[in-house]
Amino acid sequence: MIGAGTIVSRLTGFLRGIVLVAVVGSVMSPAGDAFATANQLPNNIYALISTGLLTAVVVPQIVKAASHEDGGRAFISKVFTLGTVVLLVTTVLATLAAPWLVQLYAPGYTPDQLALATTFAYWCLPQILFYGLYALVGEALNARRIYGPFTWAPIVNNIVSIAGFALFLVLFGGPLTDVVDWTPEMIALLAGTATLGIVVQAGILFFFWRRTGLHVRPDFAWRGVGLGQIGRLAGWTFLMVAAGQIAGLLQGRVVSEASGDGPAAAAMGYAWLLFMLPYSIIVLSIGTPYFTQLSEHAHAGRDDEVRGDIGRSIRTLGVFVVFATFALAAAAVPASRIFTNSASEAVQAAWVLLAYLVALIPLAVLFVIQRTFYAYDDTRTPFFFTLVQCAIVVATAYGAWGLVAAGIIGLEYLAAVVAIGQSLASIVQVVIATWLLQRRLGSLGTASWLFSLGRFVIAAIPAGVAGWGVFVLLGGADGWTASSPLLGAVGSAIIGVAALIVYVAFLALLRAPELSVATGLLRRFLPGRR
């Protein structure tokens, strides 16, 4: 149920993105970049609040509270009261500070573009409160083993957004890329719809609250909630998220200079959405059960089994992720066409996607390595190797801007160079993380799983070439696969199927033992299988 919810959520999110691009554009769209910046602000602020409050207090303690004599009712009442107050105050302060926040994140915008982004932000920043309520209620439901609503609620958000954005197209047309074309009614409908989707996403969870058996009431007696344990439980994690947010802010400031001249905030957001599709479906869906098993072995002190878990999980993830990397690279142009308004824009956006894809395989490995540290209750070490990654992200972003200032590259390539810098930072991060974990646990059998990854790459290279060949045979960037968003999706699927056939054939030729594991895993997802 959770896996299906993730897939449906991603697919409806894709459809939401397609309709939004039809409204505001993506590549070389000042209005699209303005909305992307404004709508990202609540996510950035909420990330800090959720890590500092929810992760530190609610998540570690809500399950323990279930063992209290009252079933955790008093504890959850205190937490909900505290959480709501903090979220409400943060939302009000952030909304009042909208002009300064927009200026902070996008100094490269023109005055008119800043004004539009600020107006969007006034509508979008209230999302902070409802993101927080969604997380608070969702964690309480999960603690009571009611998993479905928390997983499926984002789909309702996507449906609301799709309906609102479609209504915009009916009333006002699109894409409206010029900031001077926007009226207050247009702004209210677009940004108001985005916020309404988050409101509904949070509100729908309350319909399932009775199933928890909990009766929540306002309780301002916050002593004993566990605030004093924040540093011990999630202090390093909070600092890690803060470092990532600062790096993202500085990166965004650089990219804002390209708005209107090439891919910028909106295009990078959509490229990241494409990048995250295989990551979320493969790494999160398959990797999470491995993490549960790995955690059990770590808590039992069975380090040998932990080392075995690391190798097995990386090899299993690798057989899927390596294929996804090369297949998506072959389909970069038609896939990018899904979120652009022309074939030429798709080609520009494809460079950003390709730059991100450099890090897909390393990030799959990092998922396993980083969570092994978490399994040993070590959040301090991940903070330090993430800090290195953040420093490289910032350095490469400003290095990319230096290349533009020197006339070495044009603004149309700034986003792609920034993205490749981020990917290189992730590669350095996973190398350092693996080295540090090996110092702690001893040999991780790195050579063994690197050999397996190398074998997957050998099989994926001809698969990627075959996929690219299909793209060329279908007309390339001038063909039908780049003529519309729908046909871009169809073309991407055809390229993916061609690449998959070649990939499986080469894995069989190489006698890769992981092939049988992968096919067995896929059979478990078929209806009626367990």
Image (tube, rainbow, N blue to C red):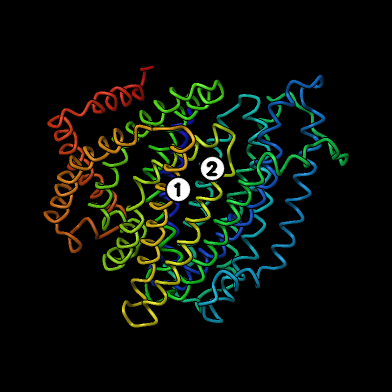
Residue beneath the point at 14% across and 58% down: 475
Task: Report helix, strand or loop for mark 1.
Answer: helix
Residue 129 lies, in percent from the top left, at 69, 51
Mark 2 is surrounded, within 10 Å at the Cα level, by few (under 14), some (14 to 19) or many (20 or more) other residues, namely: many
- The number of callouts visible is 2
Which of the marked residues, 1 or 2, is nearer the chain's N terminus?
1
Q: Quadrant of the C terminus?
A: top left
In 3D space, how far apart are the residues under numbered discs 1 and 2 (Cα atoms)? 9 Å
The residue that appears at 51% across and 79% down in the rendered structure is: 180
Task: Provide the residue designation for mark 2.
Answer: 154
Question: Tag 1: Cα neighbours inside 10 Å, few (<14), some, or many (≥20)?
Answer: some
> Residue 259: which disc?
none
Q: Kindly tell me whether residue 173 is visible in this rendering.
A: no
| Rendering coords of residue 191 (x, y %) | 57, 61
> Is the residue 392 above or below the residue 9 in the image?
below
Discs 1, 2 touching: Cβ within 8 Å: yes
Image coordinates for residue 86, horizontal then vertical, percent: 76, 50
Residue beneath disc 1: 13
Q: Estimate the x, y position of residue 223 in percent, counting from the top left.
A: 86, 38
For mark 2, give the secondary structure.
Answer: helix
Report the residue at 40% width, 53% height from top.
428
- Outermost residue, right side: 221
Going by the image, does 74 lie left or right of 365?
right
Q: Horizontally, is 126 left or right of 375 in the view? A: right
Disc 1 residue type? Gly
